[in-house]
Image (spheres, helix red, strand yellow):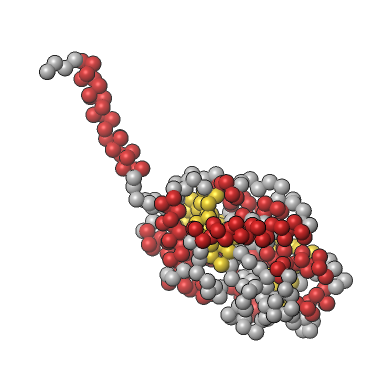
Amino acid sequence: MTTTRRTLLRVTAGLALAPSIVRAQGSAGAAWPNKPITIVVNFPAGGLTDGIARAFGQHVQQATGQQVMIDNKPGASGNIGAAQVARAPADGYTFLHSVSSTLVQNRVMFKTLGFDPDKDLTIISGTSSGVLPVVVHKSLPPEVKDLKSFIEYAKGKKINFGSWALGSSAHIFAQALNEKYGLTMEVVTYKGEAPMWQDMGAGSLQAAMGSPQAMNALLLKGDVRPIVAPSRVRYVKLPDVSTSVEQGFTDPSFTVRGWLALAAPAATPKEIVKKMSDLWVGAADSEPGKKMMDGFGLTEKPLNHEEVMKDYEVLKATVIPRLVALGLKPE
């Protein structure tokens, strides 16, 4: 067989390229994950969103053998961190851990988000945010012990009501009280729970709503006292605090509904979405997950990818009209 010089060059070139082709195919087909994972938390350290991300992330790290890093990126009621993840490569190594209000309420509360919640992100799993009690500062009279007495006390007075983010459940709750009962409370917005509870302890706020674990130090010291659980069930660690409905407040604005969302860039491969969803749901039964869930009094298991995407549509259909009806203006 005769081999021309041109043929020999083609064969030689092909052999030279073969190792790089094999390496590329091996990389593309490598099992996920094969390098560290970053979870961007779009609120400061110290609150429920951060705590769950760290505990569940520890389980993911133990299960996969890959480091899971938590990167706190607070600001603009969660929009800054969410936009960062929306722009990240959709390769399964960058995730967002947020509250559902970032993906739902913020589209009403802000003129621009820097990302499209529906087009730029897919939700991997949803963890119930549990019961978020409303508490008042110890400086308020002891007669203020439930929602009805709080409303009566607040009429005509300067009341600062703390909210961990613009458009959050706390914001909706306080604004609904203003609208329905003629109150003039000032809703003070923070970049997460930690700074809000600092101000509450200092007496700058008269009322606030948030996760029991984040406010726990204030509860133990007696700096705050709970007056209502704006939820479908009572908080297991505060069994004497009745729900809004039990106190006679049946308007949906006074019953909080939402979850913590683990999300990823929308184009993330489906098989990675499924694997991470399974890991995140399973994290609730891990040792660090159980400890965190118990600490926050959470009893509901996380929703998987399919379940949370269905509930996402329900949440949008429920909450967005409620915000519009309250007349909250976008910033």
| Residue 259 appears anywhere in the view | yes
Residue furthest to the left: 1
Task: Give above or below for 310 relative to 255.
Answer: above
Task: Give above or below for 133 relative to 167.
Answer: below
Q: What residue is at 25 percent from the left and 21 percent from the top? A: 10
204 and 192: which is toward the camera = 192
Q: Quadrant of residue 230?
A: bottom right
Q: Quadrant of residue 226?
A: bottom right
Q: What residue is at 34 percent from the left and 50 percent from the top? A: 31
164 and 152: which is toward the camera = 152
Where does residue 78 sit, x and y in percent of width and height? 62, 55
Q: Is residue 191 rendered to the left or right of residue 90? A: right
Where does residue 184 sit, x and y in percent of width and height? 83, 66
Q: What residue is at 71 percent from the left and 58 percent from the top? A: 321
Q: What residue is at 65 percent from the left and 73 percent from the top? A: 231
Q: Indicate the quadrant containing the N terminus: top left, top right, bottom left or bottom right.
A: top left
| Residue 71 appears anywhere in the view | no
Residue furthest to the right: 156
**How many numbered circles are shown?**
0
Task: Give above or below for 78 relative to 55.
Answer: above
206 and 28: which is toward the camera = 28
Where does residue 309 sit, x and y in percent of width and height? 54, 57
